[in-house]
Image (tube, coloured by chain):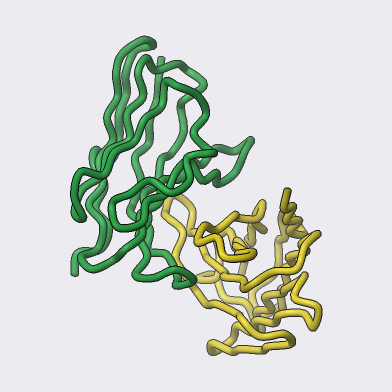
Amino acid sequence: DAGVIQSPRHEVTEMGQEVTLRCKPISGHDYLFWYRQTMMRGLELLIYFNNNVPIDDSGMPEDRFSAKMPNASFSTLKIQPSEPRDSAVYFCASSERSYYGYTFGSGTRLTVV
Amino acid sequence: GQQVMQIPQYQHVQEGEDFTTYCNSSTTLSNIQWYKQRPGGHPVFLIQLVKSGEVKKQKRLTFQFGEAKKNSSLHITATQTTDVGTYFCAPQTGTASKLTFGTGTRLQVTL
């Protein structure tokens, strides 16, 4: 298996633009998680899905952030409009079952200027 | 809400010295996982502890879960330069499937 695949690896965008991050989880994994990592706030859980259904989005910063999982093999995290404070590394992770270890993707480094 | 303290924040050791990081929770945990993140990389799952007082070993790494299931530790014996990175504990509470990551301990190893 190729693992969790995220794209793009790097994204530089101007403030106010829409940004879409993509994730392909490991086949057969029922859970998908979106995390954000910054020096100041560490690893923060934004949202997670179980069998394509959003379960907990309490970590989503504000209405500018949205996430979808239209099928078991694809998820997106969208920021519209983007702001400089959104600059961070965004990780997608998947897990086979509840209480199993997570497999993380390589992340998307987002810079908003 | 759940608070997870991880100490120390940073440790610099000479190769061959031992290293320990501690994870302390204000609430009783269902289980705890440990991850390692190399500089510029992504978190990689190391192990999961479930039972009170559990001890697990992976080569030079020893993981412990406290009797009260509120704390955990990771001990590395005779560190090597390949151990460099940030070690995170990630507890789960109740029936929630999500992990809350600790603040991490950054380990630097020099020759």
Based on the displayed image, in which of its 4 quarters is residue B66 positioned? bottom right
State the image coordinates of residue B84 (x, y, percent, origin top left).
55, 64
In the rendered view, would you say B13 is above or below A46? below
Give B17 or B102, whichever is nearer the viewer: B102
Residue A28 location (% of width, % of height):
23, 68
Q: Which quadrant would the N terminus of chain A be assigned to in this image?
A: bottom left
Q: Nearer the viewer, residue B33 or A37?
A: B33
Quadrant containing the C terminus of chain A is top left
- Residue drawn at (34%, 12%) of the image: A14
Q: Quadrant of residue B109?
A: bottom right
Chain in green (letter): A
Q: Nearer the viewer, residue B27 or B8?
A: B27
Which residue shows up at 64% across the image and 74% down it? B15
Residue occupying image coordinates x 71% and y 80%:
B65
The picture places residue A89, in percent across and down from the top left corner, at 43, 39
| Most distant residue in the top direction | A16
Front residue (pair B62, A36): A36
Q: Would residue B85 appear left or right of A113 to someone viewing this image?
A: right
Could you tell whether A7 is left or right of B18 in the image?
Answer: left
Q: Is residue B28 above or below residue A32?
A: below
In the image, residue A106 above or below residue B82: above
Say which chain is yellow: B
Q: Percent x, y for residue A101? A: 45, 70
The residue sitting at 59% across, 38% down in the picture is: A39
